[in-house]
Amino acid sequence: MNQERDRVAGLIRVMNDPGAPPMERFLACRDLTEEGEAAGFDAVIRAAGDPDGTPWYDYSIDRKFSVDSTFSQLALAVDVSHYEVEEKGTAALREEAFRALIRLADTQYFEDRLGELIDSATVRAALGEIKEAVGRGVRALAAGKKQRFDLATQLVDLACAVTPVDGPLSVELAMSVLRVSASPRTLKHAVTIVHRAEGPEMREFGEYLMTVGDERVRTEVHDALGDSR
């Protein structure tokens, strides 16, 4: 037990040391977060509040879009931490960290991960943040602002996370994105809603995707609708 406390204390020292290499500070934050430590969640929340000012920002770069990938990795760490938070009494901090990351969904890249990592309980608690992030992103897309990554698909992924909690809302959010930006990749990701949703909105949304999508999208939607009968 003492050895574990010493190890955690050491990670916290590295994470908070201005003289330590940025990547070492980031890795310490990631490890603390995965282990459900309060210090890790607090650091994630601080980083989300000032992304550009985070010491390790831009020290880990995504290969596809050549943008920062640290928030994607931290989102994964927050997800992994669910094994630890009950024992350590940090479940509320975990939820707060996820909500802080969700608020970045319109500006920071999450490598297609954010929508898959958020559990239903967190989605319910963060519906306000999700709607606001999608709304900001849609406004940016509609204004024709140059994007550093595939924002439309990331927003649709976030809408997909809502489906098990509120199917009609997930369709509403996805449609708000698709009305302004509907690339083949974005449409393909939107098929997830058809797989997850129940009720008439699922079929209506699936039929819409078959109307605007390519052959691959039509095939996937057809399969999803067929499975639902």
Image (tube, grey):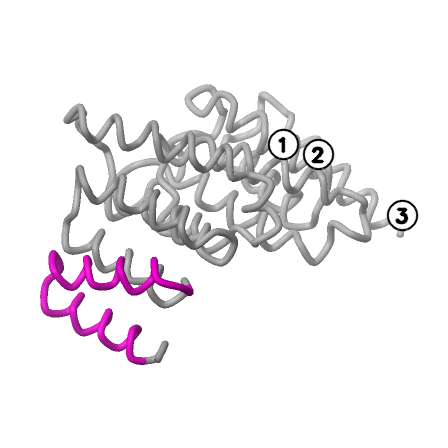
Which of the two residues, 63 or 48, is positioned nearer the viewer here?
Answer: 48
Task: Classify the position of the C terminus by image quarter.
Answer: bottom left
Q: Which residue is mark 1?
A: 15
- Cα separation, mark 1 vs mark 3, equals 20 Å
Q: Which residues are magenta?
A: 198-226
Dot 1 falls on a residue whose secondary structure is helix
Identify the mark at residue 39; answer none if there is no mark.
Answer: 2
Residue 126 found in image quarter: top right
Which of the two residues, 148 or 17, is positioned nearer the viewer here?
Answer: 148
Residue 219 found in image quarter: bottom left
Above or below 64: residue 96: above
Above or below 180: residue 217: below
Q: Residue at x 61, y 40 (%)?
A: 28
- Cα separation, mark 1 vs mark 2, equals 9 Å
Measuring from the top left, give residue 169's x and y in whole percent. Answer: 41, 46
| Within-10-Å neighbours for mark 1: few <14, some 14–19, many 20+ | many
Residue 126 is left or right of residue 167, and the answer is right
Q: Earlier in the sequence, mark 1 or mark 2?
A: 1
| Within-10-Å neighbours for mark 3: few <14, some 14–19, many 20+ | few
Q: Which residue is mark 3?
A: 2
Residue 139 is left or right of residue 163, and the answer is left
Which of the two residues, 171 or 13, is positioned nearer the viewer here?
Answer: 171
Magenta: main secondary structure: helix
Dot 2 falls on a residue whose secondary structure is helix
Q: Is residue 176 magenta?
A: no
Which three-letter amino acid code belongs to the residue tagged 2?
Ala
